[in-house]
Image (cartoon, helix red, strand yellow):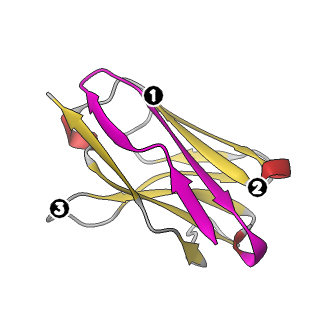
């Protein structure tokens, strides 16, 4: 019910745009992203509410922008100035609250080479 796309391999300082489209009950007030790198805990990346309110994790502020198109039930993650530390599996998630604990997608891999 959450289909993510847009991951890939990019060089440092490059850009990627992730997309995640919800279907059915997975379309919730909050849509956003988490990421998890090998051997590390899951990390909050960004979230956007239905009304357009956004929130970002401290490690990505200033480099990543989240947006959503409610008509398309899609959330986007524009990532600029990527660094190797951004390498992770990025999960799309949705929920009634900022915690986005209701639905989670399968993940899309982002790899940033130095």
Q: Quickly name the residue at label 1.
A: 62
Q: Secondary structure at mark 2?
A: loop
Indicate the quadrant where residue 36 lies.
bottom left
Q: Nearer the viewer, residue 86 or 54?
A: 86
Tell me, yes or no, whether the two marked residues, 3 and 2, touch with CB atoms within 8 Å: no
On the image, the x and y values in percent for residue 10 come to: 29, 30
CA–CA distance in space, label 2 to label 1: 25 Å
Tell me, yes or no, whether the two marked residues, 2 and 1, touch with CB atoms within 8 Å: no
Q: Is residue 2 above or below residue 112?
A: below
Q: Nearer the viewer, residue 62 or 109?
A: 109
N-terminal-most mark, 2 or 1: 1
On the image, the x and y values in percent for residue 101 come to: 55, 76
The residue under the point 55% across, 65% down is: 93
Q: Quickly name the residue at label 3.
A: 38
Left or right position of 86 against 1:
left
Q: Quickly name the residue at label 2.
A: 73
Q: Badge 1, how many Cα within 10 Å: few under 14, some, many 20+?
A: few
Residue span colored magenta: 1-25
CA–CA distance in space, label 3 to label 2: 30 Å
On the image, the x and y values in percent for residue 20 come to: 60, 54
Mark in front: 2 vs 1? 2
Q: Secondary structure at mark 3?
A: loop
Q: Quadrant of the N terminus?
A: bottom right
């Amino acid at each position: 019910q959450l289909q993510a796309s847009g991951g890939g391999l990019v060089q440092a300082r490059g850009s990627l745009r992730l997309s995640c489209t919800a279907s059915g009950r997975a379309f919730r007030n909050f849509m956003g992203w988490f990421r998890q790198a090998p051997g590390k805990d899951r990390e909050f990346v960004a979230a956007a509410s239905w009304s357009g309110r956004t929130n970002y994790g401290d490690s990505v502020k200033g480099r990543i922008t989240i947006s959503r198109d409610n008509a398309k039930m899609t959330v986007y993650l524009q990532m600029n100035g990527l660094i190797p530390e951004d390498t992770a599996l990025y999960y799309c998630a949705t929920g009634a609250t900022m915690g986005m604990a209701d639905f989670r997608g399968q993940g899309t891999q982002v790899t940033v080479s130095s």
